[in-house]
């Protein structure tokens, strides 16, 4: 067993399947000798690493750690470090106690009364606390048990010196204050001296303790430098030992044999077999049981003939400890295994795409039977985000934030991945910002680059906030719908391919092809002449030769087939395609037929892209309006809005060849000095707010489209991470 474990561990490719205890007279294995000792030493080493704040950067050169040195060195370091750490904790506790004592004394500084005057009287009672003098005085004056009293105050603290009558007990003063607005505070432990002197003495003690603490910290730092390399190497060596020693827990064992099962990459099988054979010769039998993809419900396997395999895809008998055989129940023709587990999943995406695996894993890791949608998220999520924000300045800020997250948290994979995603989102925001011609909501790129250098009349695309650009706003609704149609086509095509691979073409068509026919048929029908008199006209004008995006498309032809009797309405090709898809859905998945309107609703959900685009543009516009001001001109029969970047023209004057018809807001920039300073605060914090809301609106809406609309069509997840038995050494070497 030990030789096999060593050989498998060195390969670092074998993902163990846990034995479930189902075989007759086979028991789960026990940890190998030394496992408990190695585990205890590993806990000690990790504790020492935490105390000494050792990180991988402190490692130094790789080293050989022998068993002889390990225990002795760990104990030596533990003894010294624990002694220093105990002393550090003791000093910190003493400092906390003295700081608490200062907090207790500080209220008495306001009174200006020495501590020896607050106790030790035979005929006087003293109480110190917080309360209302106006409430305490009449209460004590009316008390039968108090002969006389005097109050001393300092801000909100009151000291009461009272002489009870001869017949009263020692609690007379306390009893008299019951129900009065007075909260007693404890007297300090110090019995003499002034509060100021006591605080000064305690502060000196804290300074001395802080000096002692610094000395201990320096000794620990020195110890950390001396032992960091050893501790990292020891942790690695012990982790490997524990890993090997606990491997038999996954085995099915008898007194004379053991069976281990697991998953390896297919291409590594011959390497695996030869390595084990080289380690133990003919004392082992190695069989490749199956190569399989699994159906979505896990009920059947798509099997492959295994070249040279001993099972050949035929069910084999269950082994028993006495050498006999028991016939297994039918399980779809698979070989008898310890546990019918799915293969683990490796998400092997290139560096630029890898951060987006985090978005996928937030739902679930892809199972072995599914497409990994990470590449699609890499292409669509930052594009959606950038399109919705679309600002050069905001894009640069997002990119900078992402760069900081990506580079400053190399040891925290989740934050690093978030940084990579933010970089991509910022990059696309910057690109779209150039196309929109905007920087922090101002059209400076449009003015100086697209109009000034390139010579265009305006930026290639606009957001459409002003009345003069309203067609752009309507056009983005159409674009959002088309994005939805494309995105959902990709999702159902993925589902179609998966079902075709795992089942057959019939399953693929009835479960996914039907939805493809329904969605494309419906939306081609919507964009066709058959509905021209019903749907809004901008559906057809957005991409026409005169539209804002002049691609020469003004709608599909009606494609009439015949007139529907009774309804007197045309039956068109797209509508027929929709009906064929709906009928196929009823045949394949009758329960899903009630959701046939999803092909309309899901696509319309993508109009949130246009909504967020206009909302974020409107917020940035409002911030700039408050600071720079906005004036209105009439251009081509519609009002156009302009920021007062340099000055605010008067109504009736000319600006760029157009008459100024209205001042929407004069702008804080054009006021006095105080107004300008207020305006700068509004400008800075306003854009910070837009930046933050860009994440919570554009980011969340984009991810919602991925999770709810896209993933739901083909993705289930439920995969396991591929965790091969082995270790990639960083701090130790065996040579």
Image (cartoon, grey):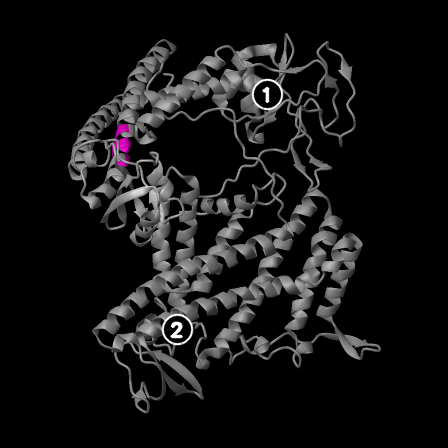
Would you say residue 389 sits in the magenta stretch?
A: no
* Image coordinates for residue 74, horizontal then vertical, percent: 34, 15
Judged left or right of residue 610, residue 492 is right
Residue 459, numbered label: 2
The one of 523 and 179 positioned closer to us in this rendering:
179
Eye-nearest disc, 2 or 1: 1
Residue 499, numbered label: none
Residue 268: quarter of image: top right
The residue beneath circle 1 is 250
Q: Residues within 10 Å of mark 1 (few under 14, many from 20)?
A: many
Q: Looking at the image, is 396 positioned above or below residue 244?
A: below
Which range is magenta? 94-100
The residue depicted at 59 percent of the width and 75 percent of the height is: 539
Judged left or right of residue 631, residue 24 is right
State the predominant SS element of the stretch in magenta. Answer: helix
Q: Looking at the image, is 31 positioned above or below residue 457?
A: above
The residue depicted at 44 percent of the width and 15 percent of the height is: 38
Camera sees residue 446: no
* Image coordinates for residue 602, horizontal then vertical, percent: 63, 61
The residue depicted at 78 percent of the width and 28 percent of the height is: 330
* Image coordinates for residue 356, horizontal then vertical, percent: 48, 47
* Image coordinates for residue 449, horizontal then vertical, percent: 32, 71
Measured Cα–Cα span from mark 2 to mark 1: 64 Å
Q: For the C terminus, which image quadrant?
A: top left
The one of 180 and 628 positioned closer to us in this rendering:
180
Q: For the N terminus, which image quadrant?
A: top right
Q: At numbered mark 1, what does the secondary structure look like: helix, strand or loop?
A: helix
């Amino acid at each position: 067993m030990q030789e096999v474990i060593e050989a498998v561990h060195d390969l670092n490719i074998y993902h163990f399947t846990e034995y479930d205890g189902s075989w007759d007279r086979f028991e789960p294995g026990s940890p190998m000798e030394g496992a408990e000792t190695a585990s205890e030493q590993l806990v000690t080493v990790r504790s020492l690493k935490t105390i000494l704040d050792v990180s991988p950067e402190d490692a130094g050169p790789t080293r050989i750690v022998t068993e002889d040195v390990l225990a002795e060195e760990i104990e030596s370091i533990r003894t010294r470090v624990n002694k220093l750490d105990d002393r550090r904790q003791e000093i910190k506790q003493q400092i906390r106690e003295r700081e608490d004592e200062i907090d207790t004394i500080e209220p008495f500084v306001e009174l200006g009364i020495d501590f020896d005057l607050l106790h030790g009287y035979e005929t006087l009672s003293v109480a110190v606390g917080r309360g209302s003098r106006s409430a305490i005085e009449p209460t004590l004056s009316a008390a039968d048990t108090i002969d006389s009293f005097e109050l001393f105050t300092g801000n909100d603290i009151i000291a009461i010196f009272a002489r009870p009558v001869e017949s009263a007990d020692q609690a007379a003063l306390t009893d008299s204050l019951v129900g009065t607005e007075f909260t007693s505070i404890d007297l300090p432990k110090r019995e003499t001296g002034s509060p100021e002197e006591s605080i000064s003495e305690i502060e000196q003690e804290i300074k001395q303790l802080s000096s002692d603490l610094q000395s201990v910290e320096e000794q620990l730092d020195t110890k950390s430098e001396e032992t960091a390399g050893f501790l990292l190497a020891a942790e690695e060596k012990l982790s490997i030992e524990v890993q090997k020693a606990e491997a038999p827990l996954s085995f099915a064992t008898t007194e004379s044999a053991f069976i281990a099962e697991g998953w390896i990459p297919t291409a590594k099988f011959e390497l695996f077999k030869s390595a084990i054979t080289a380690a133990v010769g003919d004392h082992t039998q190695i069989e490749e049981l199956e190569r399989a993809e699994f159906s979505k419900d896990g009920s059947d396997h798509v099997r492959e003939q295994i070249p040279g395999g001993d099972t050949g895809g035929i069910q084999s008998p269950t082994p028993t400890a006495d050498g006999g055989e028991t016939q297994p129940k039918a399980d779809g023709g698979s070989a008898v295994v310890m546990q019918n587990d799915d293969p683990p999943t490796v998400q092997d995406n290139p560096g630029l795409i890898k951060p987006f695996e985090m978005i996928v894993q937030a739902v679930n890791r892809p199972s072995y039977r599914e497409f990994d949608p990470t590449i699609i998220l890499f292409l669509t999520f930052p594009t959606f985000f950038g399109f919705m924000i679309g600002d050069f300045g905001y894009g640069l800020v997002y990119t900078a934030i992402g760069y900081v997250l990506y580079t400053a948290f190399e040891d925290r994979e989740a934050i690093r991945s978030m940084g990579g995603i933010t970089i991509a989102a910022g990059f696309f925001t910057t690109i779209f910002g150039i196309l929109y011609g905007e920087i922090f909501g101002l059209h400076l790129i449009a003015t100086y680059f697209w109009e000034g250098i390139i010579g265009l009349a305006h930026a290639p695309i606009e957001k459409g906030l002003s009345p003069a650009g309203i067609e752009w706003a309507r056009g983005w609704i159409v674009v959002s719908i088309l994005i939805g149609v494309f995105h959902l086509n990709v999702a159902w095509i993925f589902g179609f391919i998966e079902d075709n691979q795992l089942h057959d073409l019939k399953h693929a068509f009835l479960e996914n092809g039907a939805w493809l026919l329904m969605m494309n048929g419906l939306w081609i029908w919507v964009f066709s002449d058959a509905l021209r008199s019903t749907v809004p006209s901008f559906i057809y004008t957005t991409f026409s030769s005169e539209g804002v995006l002049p691609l020469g498309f003004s709608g599909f032809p009606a494609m009439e087939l015949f007139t529907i009797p009774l309804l007197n309405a045309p039956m068109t090709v797209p509508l027929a395609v929709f009906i064929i898809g709906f009928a196929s859905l009823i045949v394949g998945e009758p329960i899903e037929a009630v959701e046939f309107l999803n092909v309309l609703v899901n696509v319309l959900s993508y109009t949130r892209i246009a909504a967020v685009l206009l909302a974020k543009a409107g917020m940035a516009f409002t911030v700039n309006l408050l600071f720079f001001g906005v004036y209105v001109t009439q251009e081509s029969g519609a009002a156009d809005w302009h920021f007062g970047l340099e000055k605010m023209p008067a109504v009736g004057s000319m600006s760029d060849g157009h008459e100024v018809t209205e001042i929407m807001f004069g702008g804080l920039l054009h006021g006095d000095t105080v107004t300008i300073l207020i305006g700068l605060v509004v400008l800075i914090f306003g854009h910070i707010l837009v930046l933050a809301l860009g994440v919570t609106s554009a980011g969340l809406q984009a991810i919602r489209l991925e999770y709810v609309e896209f993933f739901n069509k083909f993705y289930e997840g439920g995969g396991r991470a591929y965790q091969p038995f082995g270790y990639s050494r960083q701090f130790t070497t065996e040579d």
